[in-house]
Amino acid sequence: MFLRVDKLQVELPAPARQDPNAGAALQELLGGKYGEMSTLGNYLFQSFNFRSKNKLRPFYELVAAITAEELGHVELVSNGVAMLNNGPDVPGADEGDGGDISNAPFEMMKDIRSAASFYSHAGGSVPVNSNSMSWNVDMVTTTGNVIMDLLHNFHLECGARLHKLRVYESLTQDNVTGREICGYLLVRGGVHAHAYGLALKRLTGVDIHQMLPTPNIPTDKVPEARKYLQAGSHRRIYTFSPGDYQALAGVWSGEALPTDPPGPLEVIEGMPEGGKIHQLVGVPSAFTPDYAPEEMFEIAEKLTKAAMQGAGSL
């Protein structure tokens, strides 16, 4: 089962300006070949299909725990795409009706790279790449062969880090939202590559770490990644569970990579502290959540108040 918590794995800074083309670039990290939908899909179905779970428990638990983290990465990138597509919130923008919709209020949207992000999805995110090509099941590898799956996962994480760096390099310094996502995911992707490399070494004796980091990304030179390295995020794997997946420590043990700040590898029960989810303000003229939302807000307020009054009985 999965436990859902109403937070993001890290808090994202609000965008300084609306930049739907940057949002389209970030879509590569969601629905691209090496995007978060691919890592999630691979590890999710590998964990479902894992053979001899009890006898190979440390390896199964490693894949299962990373699966849960990847689900949060999908959520993180999706929020970032929506934030960039919509731009800074305008307080009160979701009040009243949609104004004069005959005066082309979204004229600029016809020229953005991924116009469907607005026309079909109201500026939200969907599992497509930076060219709006759909993510699909062909990007999922689950062979049932433990070593082949782990080797594929190592390759997938290395490819994902390379793509994150390329997207990062396309974002200007004022794009604090997109760069924060890239910085965090570069560090966490390094953790997952290291983990799969360790798993392969435990099973085969082959020191695939001689290839690490692959690609050779100087993560400490990425300002948005540096604080996560200093906090030790590169040494931690989370169980995303209140009690299960403890045996993954049999794989995730030893020292951090020589290319990262030194320290022992740690298994953390539970999940990161996380940060609040950005609240996107509605846009009545785009019918999100509706053209005249006052009645909807009033109904929701009454329901929330009733729920809170009855919470003591739960």
Image (tube, rainbow, N blue to C red):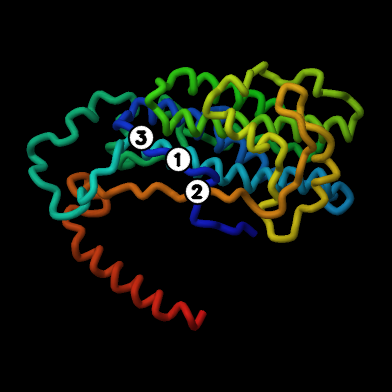
Establish if 212 lies above or below 277. Answer: above
Residue at 81%, 43% in the rendered image:
59
**Residue 127: where, in percent of width, then height?**
47, 38
Residue assigned mark 2 = 275
Residue at 79%, 53% in the rendered image:
246
Residue at 53%, 25% in the rendered image:
223
Helix, strand or loop at mark 1: loop
Residue assigned mark 3 = 15
Establish if 158 lies above or below 263. Answer: above
- Compared across the picture, whether 204 is left or right of 11 comes to right
Amino acid at circle 3: Pro
Mark 2 or 1, nearer chain start: 1
- Compared across the picture, whether 206 is left or right of 96 comes to right
Amino acid at circle 2: Gly
The reply to whether discs 2 and 1 touch (Cβ–Cβ < 8 Å) is yes
**Residue 10: where, in percent of width, then height?**
52, 43
Residue 164 seen in render: yes
Q: Residues within 10 Å of mark 3 (few under 14, many from 20)?
A: many
